[in-house]
Amino acid sequence: MALVKYNNNSISAITSTGLTAGAMTLIKEQTASSSSTISFVHGTSDVVISSAYPIYLFKFINIHPATDSVHFQVNFRDGGSSYDATKTSTVFEAYHLESDDSALGYKDSNDLAQSTGVQRITSNIGNDNDQCGCGELWLFNPSSTTFVKHFIVRSVHYGNPEVYAEDYYAAGYCNVTAAIDAAQFSMSSGNIDSGTIKLYGIKDS
């Protein structure tokens, strides 16, 4: 059996004071306030999405929609001004209703096949005062002009029209040779009423 050795510089530790020294660096935090979109654009407002880091991590916290039963979603920019990078992805989810019904399955209605449209990163978040969604999106090597740019999503939200917890997974790639230099978050309808999105850069050594 081969011995696997981890580089301690790439592992962050959790202590009583929170996340300690490691490879994860907070680049930008934005808070929604009835926002139609939240964009992270390289070179704007101290945002970095470049070869400075091989991995980028977006954390979205207590995302609350203004409209009931809408999807939180993302799209990527590959140069120019439009968020329309071509994407192929796969999605599955598990949910458990308060009534105790549950299911696990592939979500073919939420995946993409060479599409320039948005990628859902939750589905059907309710807009009651106690409803929201949380999760993270990983973007790998966005500055590459050789390889596709992979992304992974994991989220959980309080769903409507029936009350349930949904564990949501999406993964795919931007099938472009141009670098990805921006990401834009939005709701499928209406505004992002409140919530926070944080962008981190992660070194590989």
Image (tube, grey):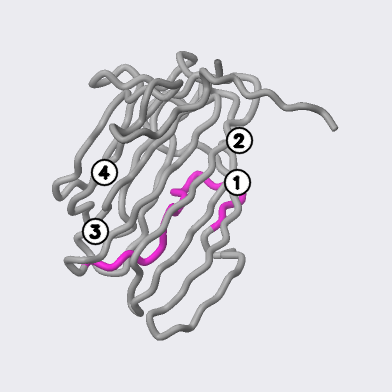
Residue pictured at 52% horizontal, 60% vertical: 110
Q: Nearer the viewer, residue 187 or 105?
A: 105
Mark closest to the chain's N terminus, 4 or 3: 4
Please report the bounds of the magenta region as a residue range. Answer: 111-127
Callout 1: SS: strand
Measured Cα–Cα span from mark 4 to mark 2 = 23 Å
Front position among marks 2 and 3: 3
Residue 69 colored in magenta in the image: no
Q: Quadrant of residue 65?
A: bottom left
Callout 4: SS: strand
Are the residues tagged 2 and 3 within 8 Å (C-beta)?
Answer: no
Mark closest to the chain's N terminus, 2 or 3: 3
Q: Which amino acid is tagged 2?
A: Asn
Q: Which residue is mark 3?
A: 65
Q: What x and y, as percent, mark residue 157? A: 36, 61
Mark closest to the chain's N terminus, 3 or 1: 3
Q: Which residue is mark 4?
A: 37
Q: Which amino acid is tagged 3?
A: Pro
Disc ID at residue 175: 2
Badge 4: few (under 14), some or many (20 or more) residues near its Cα, within 10 Å? some
Residue 117 colored in magenta in the image: yes
Measured Cα–Cα span from mark 1 to mark 4 = 22 Å
Q: Nearer the viewer, residue 141 or 102?
A: 102
Are the residues tagged 1 and 2 within 8 Å (C-beta)?
Answer: yes
Apparent side of residue 2 relative to residue 6 in the rendered image (left or right): right
Badge 2: few (under 14), some or many (20 or more) residues near its Cα, within 10 Å? some
Above or below, comparing residue 114 to residue 143 in the picture: below
